[in-house]
Image (spheres, helix red, strand yellow):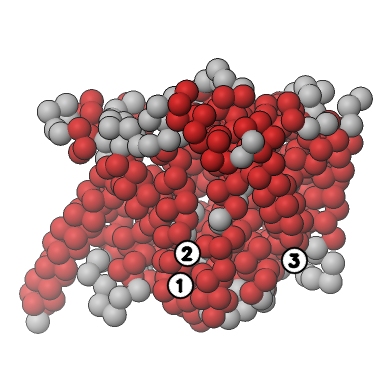
């Protein structure tokens, strides 16, 4: 047995034990299970939000894109900066309204703001659809990490099943508290490991960071810049904007806002989280270091770049430490996704059908829905071939369609009616779904347009359509309402 396997196994046991221990002294009511009793301070909220943003996408996807795509990878840094900038103004009013109205989930916010339970149902359905690729991302990453770091001793399929069982067990027991405490371990590990790898590997293989980039540019001219077509400047800008606006729209990330003790937590975090995301630069350096050292990775295999290079450079025990870190980057956000998904099913899909259901019964149903959701996500994971970044972009394109209705709901006079908000969401999500299922792109749909327009992210186009439809339907329904009011006088 290689030295990596016991270290990875220890990480799984530690995650399970810490997740179960987190419930000690707390009665797992619906409020405790979903939002931690709304009592988390700055540090726990920081770690929880970082735990949701810095996932297997950070660990494998970002390095894989640096390896396979080059220059376009930097969109990740740009959109994260914008996400935290937006949070400074966006999150405090959301938190205040949620606390005043004792909200549990993202759809609750829409249902309350627009006084429409069925709009909440629509938002829940969109959220569930978007959560599946996000959870698949974590499980797929976990399979890659454990299989590679264990030198093939554990297959990706077995690793996925073990990870899903582990996260399901501690989510059912401890809810969001288990996620928060595991975030502490995850952030310590990932910060230490990623910074070390990003500095050591370029010097080990190239003699420094500058010599590494010179070697890449000489071997692959233009690789470190944006291409003229495809992932060009217009793709870069539209994708950055799309993902920045959708950053807080995933149900599990939106729901983490409710866990805070006070509104100023978010403003303090908006100052420090951008500094924390600088560690992505070190992840990129690992991916770039692999370009010339482990050539030939194609398709989904680009996500293996970090581990392929690490196996060449380090002894098995240290590869095990890297693998253990990767395990936590999958389990922490995975647990938040399961909590959010189960809450959507029980609280936002079942409860409207049974308004008399108590919080206690909804809490029990949410816990029972957790393993079912885990099984569904495992099924998709074992029968999908997309790369990690592609999965994330698909999820973002869906949830970003919820942003216009959220933003206008915070205005003193909301220009959208509940009908307009729903119509806009349906138009945006429908556009994304139709193009994804049909395999369409801007180029195939509009071959006569200039190249810069053809490269625009289709999700951004769907967002524009969303806003136009929402405003038109709102105008029509508001006029219809005014006409009816006049007629009744």
Q: Nearer the viewer, residue 298 or 350?
A: 298
Alpha carbon distance from label 2 to label 1: 7 Å
Q: In the rendered image, which quarter is residue 143 located in? A: top right
Does residue 211 show up?
Answer: yes
Structural crowding at the residue carrying mark 1, measured as other residues with C-alpha within 10 Å and reported as few (<14), some (14–19) or many (≥20)? some
Depth check, mark 1 against mark 3: the one in front is: 1
Q: Position of residue 204 (x, y in %)?
A: 69, 35
Q: Residue at x 62, y 66 (%)?
A: 46
Nearer to us of marks 3 and 2 is 2
Q: Which residue is mark 2?
A: 84
Q: Nearer the viewer, residue 284 or 353?
A: 284
Seen in the image, is 293 located left or right of residue 121?
A: right
**Residues at marks 3 and 2 touching, judged by CB atoms closer than 8 Å:** no
Residue 381 sits above or below residue 243 on the image: above
Residue 41 lies in quadrant: bottom right
Direction right: furthest residue: 1
Q: Is residue 30 above or below residue 69?
A: below
Position in image of residue 409 (x %, y %): 33, 70
Nearer to us in this view, 130 or 456: 456
- The percent coordinates of residue 159 (x first, y second) are 75, 31
Q: Position of residue 108 (x, y in %)?
A: 47, 65
Q: Quadrant of the C terminus?
A: bottom left
- Badge 3 or badge 2: first in the primary sequence: 3
Q: Nearer the viewer, residue 68 or 105?
A: 68
Cβ atoms under marks 2 and 1 closer than 8 Å: yes
Instruction: Name the residue at 51% across, 70% down.
Output: 270
| Residue denoted by label 1 | 88
Secondary structure beneath label 2:
helix
Report how far apart the C-alphas of labels 3 and 2 lie in the structure.
31 Å
Per the image, the residue denoted by label 3 is 28
């Amino acid at each position: 047995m290689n030295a990596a396997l016991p270290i990875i196994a220890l990480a799984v046991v530690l995650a399970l034990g810490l997740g179960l221990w987190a419930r000690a002294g707390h009665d797992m009511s619906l409020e405790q299970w979903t939002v931690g009793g709304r009592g988390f301070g700055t540090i726990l909220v920081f770690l929880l939000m970082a735990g949701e943003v810095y996932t297997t996408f950070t660990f494998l996807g970002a390095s894989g894109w640096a390896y396979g795509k080059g220059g376009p990878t930097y969109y990740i840094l740009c959109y994260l900066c914008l996400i935290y900038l937006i949070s400074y103004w966006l999150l405090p009013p959301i938190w205040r309204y949620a606390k005043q109205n004792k909200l549990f989930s993202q759809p609750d916010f829409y249902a309350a703001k627009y006084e429409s339970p069925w709009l909440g149902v629509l938002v829940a359905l969109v959220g569930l659809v978007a959560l599946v690729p996000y959870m698949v991302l974590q499980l797929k990453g976990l399979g890659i990490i454990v299989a590679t770091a264990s030198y093939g001793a554990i297959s990706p399929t077995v690793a996925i099943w073990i990870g899903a069982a582990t996260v399901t067990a501690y989510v059912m027991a401890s809810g969001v508290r288990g996620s928060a405490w595991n975030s502490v371990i995850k952030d310590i590990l990932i910060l230490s490991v990623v910074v070390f790898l990003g500095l050591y590997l370029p010097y080990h293989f190239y003699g420094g960071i500058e010599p590494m980039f010179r070697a890449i540019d000489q071997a692959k001219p233009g690789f470190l810049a944006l291409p003229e077509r495809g992932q060009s400047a217009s793709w870069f800008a539209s994708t950055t904007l799309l993902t920045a606006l959708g950053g807080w729209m995933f149900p599990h990330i939106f729901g983490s806002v409710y866990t805070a003790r006070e509104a100023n937590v978010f403003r303090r975090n908006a100052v420090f989280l951008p500094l924390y995301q600088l560690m992505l630069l070190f992840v990129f350096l690992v991916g770039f270091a692999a370009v010339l050292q482990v050539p030939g990775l194609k398709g989904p295999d680009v996500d293996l770049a970090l581990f392929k290079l690490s196996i060449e450079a380090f002894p098995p025990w240290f590869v095990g430490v890297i693998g253990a870190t990767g395990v936590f980057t999958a389990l922490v956000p995975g647990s938040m996704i399961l909590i959010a998904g189960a809450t959507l099913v029980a609280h936002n899909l079942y409860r409207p059908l049974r308004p008399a259901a108590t919080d206690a019964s909804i809490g029990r149903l949410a816990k029972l829905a957790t393993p079912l959701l885990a099984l569904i996500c495992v099924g998709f994971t074992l029968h999908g071939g997309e790369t990690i970044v592609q999965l994330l972009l698909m999820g973002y394109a869906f949830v970003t369609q919820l942003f216009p209705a959220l933003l206008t709901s915070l205005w003193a006079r909301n220009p959208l009616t509940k009908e307009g908000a729903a119509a806009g969401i349906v138009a945006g999500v429908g556009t994304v779904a139709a193009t994804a299922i049909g395999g369409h792109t801007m180029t195939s749909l509009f071959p006569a347009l200039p190249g810069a327009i053809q490269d625009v992210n289709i999700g951004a186009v769907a967002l524009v359509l969303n806003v136009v439809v929402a405003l038109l339907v709102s105008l029509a329904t508001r006029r219809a309402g005014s006409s009816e009011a006049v007629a009744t006088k």
